[in-house]
Amino acid sequence: MIVLAINKIQRAKAWEQVASQLQELIVTGYWKKGERLPGEIELAKQFGVSRSTLREALRALSSNGLVQIRHGEGSFVWYPEVEEYLNPLMPRLLVEREDVLAIMEARSMVEVRTARLAAERATPREVKELAALLEKMEASKDDRREFAKLDHRFHKQVAVATHNKVIIKIYEAIEVFLLSQQLEVVDYVDAIDRGVNDHQAIYAAIAGGDPEGAEEVMAKHMKRTYEAIMANRQ
């Protein structure tokens, strides 16, 4: 007879239940970042637990980065911004081939959806800014470095046009990587002409308020860029 190494399920400890409820309240926005939580006595009373149990729950949330415990001041809601997670990764991602390709795949997923949202939400002013950047790109075909910088600005403007703060922060967090990649890709054969054609199509879809079209042309652009990187790194 085979004996399975299964442990009996233990009931959740009181502090774990308190921590779980507090976490849910924070994540759902009941308390905002930087907001001071109610005092220990009040919270303990509301949960029907001892202050020591509450403190253990707060320590757990502090370890997870959701709460800052300031001695003499109280406990405050706190969590890192998106870029605080991503920025420490950038130096390593810039030098490791496998990670560069993996980030390109992830970028493709983000940028395709970003183009769709931009086509749905871009204001006339944002569309005008995209048009101006595209015009500058077309005028900079003989200056590859300047073209790459404008390419980068174009994609950032597409992100801005989504009016989605998380997407914009993700883009800003990986800006160094993206610009480095664009400065590399722009030296590939036919990169300039391909870049102009792709960005013209992206602009036309966004300016025309065509979400499906924007999604499609951005997906093609990302695919061609990925294939170019693969071909030139073999």
Image (tube, helix red, strand yellow):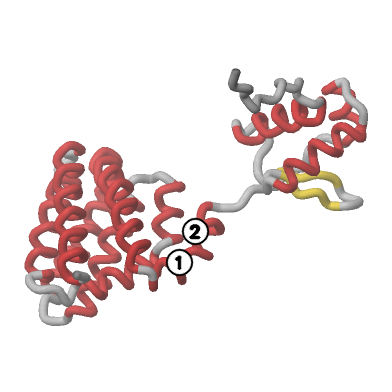
Q: Position of residue 31 (x, y in %)?
A: 68, 36
**Residue at the location (41% across, 44% down)?**
164
Q: Secondary structure at mark 2?
A: helix
Q: Is residue 100 left or right of residue 15?
A: left
Q: Nearer the viewer, residue 105 or 201?
A: 105
Q: Which residue is mark 2?
A: 86
Q: Nearer the viewer, residue 114 or 60?
A: 60
- Mark count: 2
The label number, if any, that marks residue 205 in the structure image? none
Quadrant holding the C terminus: bottom left
Q: Is residue 64 left or right of residue 98?
A: right
**Residue at the location (17% across, 53% down)?**
223
Q: Is residue 140 left or right of residue 116?
A: left
Evaluate if marks 1 and 2 touch, with contact meaning CB atoms under 8 Å apart.
yes
Three-letter code for the amino acid on which mark 2 is drawn? Leu
Give the CA separation, mark 1 to mark 2. Answer: 7 Å
Q: Which residue is mark 1?
A: 90
Direction top: furthest residue: 1
Q: Nearer the viewer, residue 227 or 129?
A: 227
**Counting other residues with Cα less than 10 Å from the Cα at mark 2, is it few (<14), some (14-19), or many (20 or more)?**
few
Q: Position of residue 73 (x, y in %)?
A: 87, 49
**Residue at the location (14% across, 48% down)?**
217
